[in-house]
Image (cartoon, rainbow, N blue to C red):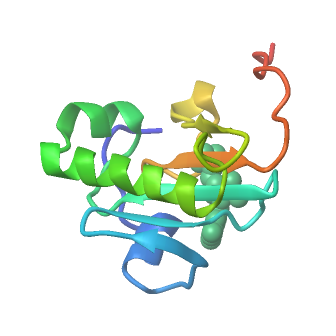
Amino acid sequence: MPFTYDDSNIFARILRGEIPCDRVAENDHALAFRDIAPKVPVHVLVIPKGNYVSFDDFAANAGEGEIAGFMRLCAEVCAAEGVGLEQGQGFRVISNAGAHGVQEVPHFHLHIMGGAVMGPMIGARG
Ligand code: 5GP
């Protein structure tokens, strides 16, 4: 997967309103919506509105306002979905990046997953 942003990806199309999503929360810098194929009862994707390919791209190149807005929206999602430690029993956050991370959609996103015991950390394949 190249480290250049391709704005034909599915999450860019969601941000442009070309395809629908089940929106959970939004602010000036980020959007949260339900994963179309949830792996656990709570499975929300949080994406920045800016064009970043992966976690490392976002962490290196996003502005402070974008990073703060993105992280605050993650906290809002955890609370609203009842999985934050003040409300619930916890959650797992995953970010897949590139070929070894098995990233399908090349627009940076966090998976916020909860509502069930996650089990052990995932082992590497091969
Ligand atoms: P990745 O492997 O890139 O971290 O995960 C991409 C995630 O996006 C997958 O969990 C997949 O189910 C989800 N996804 C793919 N296409 C769509 C879509 O059109 N809408 C929504 N809401 N989720 C999608």
- Residue at 43% x, 48% y: name it: 108
Q: Is residue 63 visible in the rendered structure shown here?
A: no
Q: Is residue 41 left or right of residue 28?
A: right
Q: Position of residue 15 (x, y in %)?
A: 39, 74
Furthest toward the front, the residue is 86
Q: Taking the image as four quarters, which one is ligand 1 found in?
A: bottom right
Q: Is residue 125 left or right of residue 8?
A: right
Q: Position of residue 107 (x, y in %)?
A: 43, 53
- Residue 30, picture quadrant: bottom left
Tell me: residue 24, above or below residue 93: below
The residue closer to the viewer here, 96 or 4, is 96
Q: How many marks?
A: 0
Q: Is residue 7 visible in the rendered structure shown here?
A: yes
Tell me: residue 89, above or below residue 123: below
Q: Is residue 53 left or right of residue 79?
A: left
- Residue at 21% x, 51% y: name it: 66
**On the rendered image, what quadrant is the C terminus found in?**
top right
Q: Position of residue 49 (x, y in %)?
A: 31, 63
The residue closer to the viewer here, 88 or 102, is 88
Q: Position of residue 68 (x, y in %)?
A: 24, 47
- Residue at 45% x, 58% y: name it: 76
- Residue at 38% x, 45% y: name it: 53
The residue closer to the viewer here, 98 or 122, is 122
Tell me: residue 10, above or below residue 71: below
